Amino acid sequence: MLDINFNMNNEFSDKFWNFLNPKKWFRKIYTKDNVNILFIDDKEMPVVANLKKNGYKVKKVRDVENINDAEIKNSQIIFVDFDGVGKFISKQHQGAGLVKELKVEYKESKYIVLYTAEPSMPTDTTMNELFNIADARMRKDDDVTDFTDQIREGLKNLK
């Protein structure tokens, strides 16, 4: 039974308004237990093992040849390295070019984080535009808690 709360101020709960919104009727709610996370990186990422120990469903691949690869289709949150991956999609822009293609293809159904080992994001205008296409940006050497924060943000934003 639907739990609809009505208080003395004539205000309805969020559950009531969500019930009235047909767009939310069939929307899957993602949680730590049912979200698939993919790291695309040509180097080892110790954070992957740490996330697995914490109960996340995480896979890591060295690169992808096609934005419709099974690993991508089956993942809702994708972390993409800026350098060394995406060469099959964009030789010039690599990871940033891959992020652009993923956002064009999957829009809001995937939460995409672009990360780099560089001390700062590139200031080149073209690269800056590509960086801004990602849902989030971070440093490769950030703490595991920073990665889990991005996963939580992704869970809230997936559609």
Image (cartoon, helix red, strand yellow):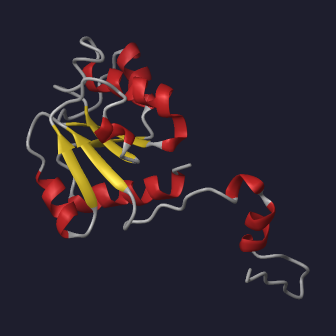
Q: Position of residue 14 (x, y in %)?
A: 73, 71
Give the answer, above or below, for where 3 lies relative to 46: below
Give the residue at x 46% y 57%: 155
| Horizontal side, residue 74 vs residue 118: left or right | right
Q: Position of residue 138 (x, y in %)?
A: 30, 43
Give the answer, above or below, for where 102 lies relative to 139: above
| Horizontal side, residue 18 vs residue 68: left or right | right
Give the residue at x 22% y 18%: 87
Give the answer, above or below, for where 64 lies relative to 31: above
The quadrant in which residue 111 appears is top left
Q: Position of residue 28 (x, y in %)?
A: 55, 58
Residue with the most extreme left position = 44
Residue with the most extreme front position = 70
The quadrant in which residue 128 appears is top left
Count of number-bearing discs: 0
Give the residue at x 28% y 59%: 57
Give the answer, above or below, for where 111 lies relative to 32: above
Q: Position of residue 35 (x, y in %)?
A: 39, 58
Residue with the most extreme bottom position = 8
Q: Quadrant of the N terminus?
A: bottom right
The quadrant in which residue 118 appears is top left
